[in-house]
Image (cartoon, rainbow, N blue to C red):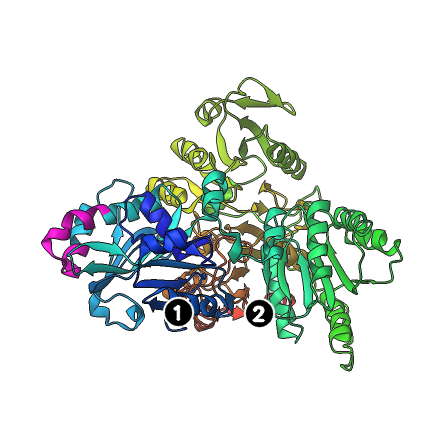
C-alpha cells in the first residue's frame, strides 16, 4: 500500500517527524481560510503515486492568489507517468540551506532493516556520487542502533545543534517500520533551513499490505481511493488480485503463479492481456461474478480467457460457480475456457451442457491460443494442436504391494509414512479439511494444537493447548501450521522451541517485519522452516505435508522445487501425465521472507540417491534464482536442473498475487535472473511443457 506525499506527511506528523504545514486541495472555493493560513509564497505539489513530479512540472512555486488560480487547474489536468493528478498539496515555501536524503526500509536481499542517507538530496539524488551515500543495517530486534544514527549524522555533516532533532527523526522512521508496518519510510529532501532546523519537505511511505490487513482502522484512515480506479476498488473488495494492463484479452486465472505464466504466454504469442486477474484459491461465485463483470464491462476486452488448474479446488466446482455466475451476468463477449487437472473433464461437461453460444471450451493451452488468436487476429492462420506425448517411466523399485519406493537418504529419510505429524490450528475449517486430506494420502497425523481447545478431539485426533504438550505425548517429526497471520509467527516459534525437525507454515499474509523477527530468532535453530505461504511438501507414496493435491503425484526421480503453488501443480501434473514421477516436491513459499530457499532444497537432494533431475519453478522478484545459480556454480552440483520463471512480461512496481512477486529497480529483474541461471548451466524452459519435455530427454 503506497502512500502519496500528503498522506505520508500526515503519518510523519503523527509520529513526531517535523513537516511543513499543508493542506489537500482540488479547488480554491471553500478553501480560502486554509490558503490564507499557509500564506504566499507557497508550493503547489501534484499528488501521484510516482516520482518525477518536479521534472514533469507537477511542483510549482506560486507567489499570490492569482497565480494559484492559474496553476491549480493546470496541475490537476496533468498526467504524470500516465497517472492522473487527483489533488494537490499546498504548503509554505521553505528557505533551504541544504538538502539531504534519509530513509529506513526493509531490505529483502539481506533480510534486515537498512538506514540510508545521502548528503545530496532532492530531485537529483539518484545521479549523486556513491561517495555521498551511506547505508547501514539496523538491529531493530535488540534496539541497538544508536551507533547507526550517529554514523548517519556525522556522514551527513549536520550542525551539532540539530543532533537531538535528527536522533528523534531517525528513531521515528525506524518505528514506522518496526511497529506501524512500513516497508519504506523515506524523506527526500530532508531540508536544513536557513533558521537551522530540520524539516521533511517530501515524504514517501510504502506500507505492508499484510500488516494493514491486521489494522483495518489504520488502513481505512490512510487509504486514498482517488489513486485507484473503480475497477481496482471493486476487485480488492472482492478479494481479487487485479491490475489493468494495455491489451485486449481479459484473463481470469486461479493462482498467482499460473496467472503470471498465463500473462507471459499471451504476451509472447502477440495476444496482449488487458488485465492481470487472480481469483485466488477459492474461485467461488462472488469472486467469479466480480471478475466476470469487470471483464465484460471493460470496453478494451475483446475476448475473455478463463484458465483454471484444478488442484484441491476441482474444475467441476469452478464450472458450477461459472454456471451460477452466468445466470447473473450477461456474457456479451466470446469466452475461451481451459480446464486442466483435477476433474477437468467433469468441468468441461458441466459447461458444455449449457450450450452457451459465447463459451468456447478447449482442452489445452495450444488450442486456447489458437481460439484467442482467431478472435483477436481473424486473418491469422490457426495452429495445429499437437496431442500430448507419453514418455516412458524411468526405472523404479516396485514393492510387492504395488507401491513405488525410492528410499531417500539424508534429512529426507526422516520424512516417510511413519513420521508423526502435528497440525497447529487443527480445529479451524481449513486446518480440519487439510488434515483429512493429508490422512487420506497416508500421512500419519497424530495430534493437533489449538489454544483453549486442549482435551477435545478432531476426527479422533487429540487436541492440545500448546505445542509443548503435544510433543510431551508424541514424537513429532513435522508440524503443519494453519494459523491466522496475527498468530502464525508465535506458532512457528513454538514449534522451533520444541526442536520439531520440519515446520511447514501454510499461512499467508504474515507481516514482513514479523517474519524478520521469526527468522532472526530461528537463526540457530535445528528446525527446518518451509514457508510461510507455502503449499507444503510431498514425497509421493510416503508423506504429504500441506495443501498440495495428492492425486497428481507419482513416485519417480525428479525433484520439483517452486515459489508458486499452481505452477507446481501444473508441472507435476504434466510430469505425471508424461510418465515421469517425482522424488520430492516442495513449495518454498511466495512471500518475501521465508525459511528454506531453493538453494537449501538442492542441498537436501544433492546426495539423496534417488533424484536424477531437478525442476525449479521461479518467478520475478527477489534473488532466490540468482542464489541458486551461484550455489550450482560454487559447488559443482552435478544433477541436471531445468528452470522456469513466471512473470517475465510483468510491468515493474506492481505486486502480482504473491507479496514476493514484485519487480523493483535493480532487484529481481528478469534479464539478470535468466542470465545467472543460464551461466550456471540451468536449462531455462520457455514454457512448462518445454520444461517437461527437456527433463524427459535428460532422463533418457
Q: Is residue 239 magenta?
A: no
Q: Position of residue 662 (x, y in %)?
A: 48, 60
1 vs 2, front mark: 1
| Magenta: main secondary structure | helix
The residue that appears at 46% across and 69% down in the rendered structure is 677
Above or below, 445 against 225 in this view is above
**Which label was assigned to residue 572?**
none
Q: Position of residue 220 (x, y in %)?
A: 49, 43
Quick one: which residue is furthest to the left in this view?
160
User: Crowdedness of circle 2 by 10 Å Cα count: few (<14), some, many (20+)?
Assistant: some
Residue 668 in view, yes or no: yes
Q: Which residues are magenta?
A: 152-168
User: Crowdedness of circle 1 by 10 Å Cα count: few (<14), some, many (20+)?
Assistant: few
Which residue is under mark 1? Answer: 52
Residue 556 in view, yes or no: no
Q: Are marks 1 and 2 in contact (CB under 8 Å)?
A: no
Q: Nearer the viewer, residue 129 or 263?
A: 129
Which residue is under mark 2? Answer: 685
Looking at the rendered image, the quarter that the C terminus falls into is: bottom right
Q: Is residue 169 left or right of 465 when viewed as pictured?
A: left
Which type of secondary structure does the marked residue at label 1 adopt? loop
Q: Position of residue 539 (x, y in %)?
A: 58, 46
Give the CA distance from mark 1 to mark 2.
37 Å
Q: Nearer the viewer, residue 456 or 222?
A: 222
Q: Is residue 164 magenta?
A: yes
Q: Position of residue 86 (x, y in %)?
A: 50, 60
Amino acid at each position: 500500500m503506497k502512500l502519496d506525499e500528503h498522506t505520508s506527511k500526515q503519518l510523519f506528523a503523527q509520529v513526531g517527524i517535523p513537516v511543513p504545514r499543508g493542506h489537500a486541495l482540488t479547488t480554491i472555493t471553500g478553501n480560502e481560510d486554509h490558503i490564507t493560513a499557509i500564506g504566499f509564497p507557497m508550493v503547489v505539489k501534484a499528488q501521484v503515486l510516482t516520482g518525477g513530479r518536479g521534472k514533469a512540472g507537477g511542483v510549482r512555486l506560486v507567489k499570490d492568489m492569482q497565480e494559484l488560480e492559474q496553476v491549480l487547474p493546470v496541475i490537476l489536468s496533468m498526467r504524470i507517468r500516465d497517472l492522473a493528478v487527483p489533488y494537490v498539496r499546498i504548503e509554505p515555501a521553505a528557505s533551504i540551506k541544504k538538502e539531504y536524503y534519509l530513509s529506513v526500509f526493509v531490505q529483502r536481499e539481506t533480510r534486515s532493516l537498512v538506514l540510508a542517507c545521502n548528503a545530496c538530496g532532492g530531485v537529483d539524488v539518484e545521479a549523486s556520487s556513491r561517495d555521498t551515500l551511506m547505508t547501514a543495517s539496523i538491529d531493530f530486534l535488540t534496539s541497538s542502533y544508536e551507533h547507526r544514527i550517529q554514523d548517519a549524522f556525522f556522514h551527513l555533516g549536520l550542525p551539532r545543534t540539530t543532533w537531538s532533532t535528527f536522533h528523534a527523526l531517525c528513531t521515528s522512521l525506524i518505528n514506522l517500520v518496526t511497529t506501524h508496518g512500513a516497508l519504506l519510510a523515506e524523506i527526500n529532501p530532508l531540508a536544513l533551513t536557513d533558521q537551522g532546523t530540520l524539516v521533511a519537505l517530501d515524504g514517501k511511505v510504502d506500507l505492508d499490505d499484510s500488516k494493514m490487513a491486521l489494522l483495518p482502522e489504520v488502513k481505512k484512515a490512510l487509504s486514498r481511493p482517488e489513486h485507484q480506479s473503480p475497477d481496482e476498488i471493486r476487485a480488492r473488495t472482492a478479494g481479487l488480485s487485479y491490475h489493468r494492463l494495455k491489451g485486449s484479452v481479459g484473463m481470469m486465472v486461479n493462482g498467482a503463479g499460473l496467472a503470471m505464466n498465463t500473462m507471459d504466454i499471451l504476451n509472447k504469442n502477440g495476444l496482449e492481456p488487458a488485465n492481470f486477474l487472480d481469483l485466488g484459491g477459492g474461485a467461488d461465485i462472488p469472486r467469479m461474478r466480480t471478475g466476470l463483470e469487470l471483464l465484460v464491462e471493460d470496453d478494451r476486452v475483446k475476448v475473455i480467457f478463463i484458465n483454471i488448474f484444478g488442484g484441491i479446488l476441482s474444475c467441476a466446482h469452478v464450472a458450477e460457480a461459472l454456471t451460477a455466475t452466468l445466470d447473473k451476468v450477461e456474457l456479451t463477449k466470446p469466452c475461451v475456457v481451459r480446464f486442466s487437472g483435477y476433474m477437468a473433464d467433469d468441468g468441461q461437461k458441466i459447461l458444455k451442457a449449457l450450450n452457451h453460444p459465447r463459451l468456447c471450451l478447449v482442452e489445452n493451452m495450444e488450442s486456447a491460443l489458437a481460439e484467442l488468436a482467431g478472435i483477436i487476429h481473424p486473418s491469422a492462420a490457426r495452429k495445429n494442436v499437437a496431442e500430448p506425448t507419453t514418455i516412458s517411466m524411468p526405472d523404479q523399485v516396485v514393492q510387492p504391494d504395488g507401491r513405488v519406493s525410492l528410499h531417500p537418504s539424508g534429512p529426507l529419510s526422516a520424512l516417510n509414512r511413519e513420521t508423526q505429524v502435528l497440525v497447529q490450528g487443527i480445529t479451524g475449517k481449513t486446518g480440519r479439511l487439510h488434515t483429512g486430506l493429508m490422512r487420506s494420502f497416508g500421512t500419519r497425523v497424530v495430534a493437533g494444537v489449538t489454544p483453549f481447545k486442549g482435551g477435545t478431539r478432531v476426527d479422533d485426533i487429540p487436541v492440545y493447548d500448546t505445542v509443548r504438550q503435544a510433543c510431551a505425548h508424541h514424537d513429532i517429526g513435522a508440524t503443519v501450521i494453519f494459523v491466522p497471520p496475527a498468530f502464525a509467527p508465535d506458532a512457528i516459534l513454538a514449534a522451533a522451541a520444541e526442536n520439531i525437525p520440519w515446520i511447514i507454515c501454510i499461512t499467508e499474509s504474515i507481516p514482513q517485519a514479523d517474519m524478520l523477527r521469526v527468522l532472526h530468532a530461528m537463526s540457530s535453530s535445528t528446525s527446518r522452516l518451509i514457508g510461510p505461504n507455502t503449499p507444503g511438501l510431498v514425497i509421493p507414496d510416503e508423506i504429504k505435508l500441506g495443501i498440495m493435491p495428492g492425486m497428481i503425484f507419482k513416485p519417480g526421480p525428479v525433484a520439483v522445487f517452486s515459489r508458486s503453488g499452481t505452477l507446481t501443480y501444473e508441472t507435476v501434473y504434466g510430469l505425471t501425465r508424461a510418465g515421469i514421477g517425482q522424488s520430492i516436491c516442495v513449495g518454498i513459499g511466495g512471500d518475501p521472507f521465508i525459511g528454506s530457499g531453493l538453494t537449501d532444497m538442492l542441498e537436501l537432494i544433492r546426495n539423496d540417491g534417488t533424484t536424477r533431475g531437478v525442476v525449479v519453478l521461479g518467478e520475478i522478484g527477489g534473488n532466490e534464482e540468482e542464489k541458486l545459480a551461484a550455489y550450482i556454480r560454487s559447488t559443482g552440483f552435478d544433477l541436471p536442473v531445468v528452470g522456469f520463471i513466471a512473470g517475465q512480461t510483468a510491468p515493474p512496481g506492481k505486486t502480482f498475487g504473491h507479496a514476493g512477486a514484485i519487480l523493483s529497480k535493480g532487484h529481481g529483474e528478469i534479464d539478470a535472473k535468466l542470465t545467472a541461471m543460464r551461466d550456471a548451466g540451468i536449462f531455462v524452459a520457455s514454457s512448462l511443457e518445454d520444461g517437461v519435455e527437456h527433463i524427459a530427454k535428460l532422463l533418457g
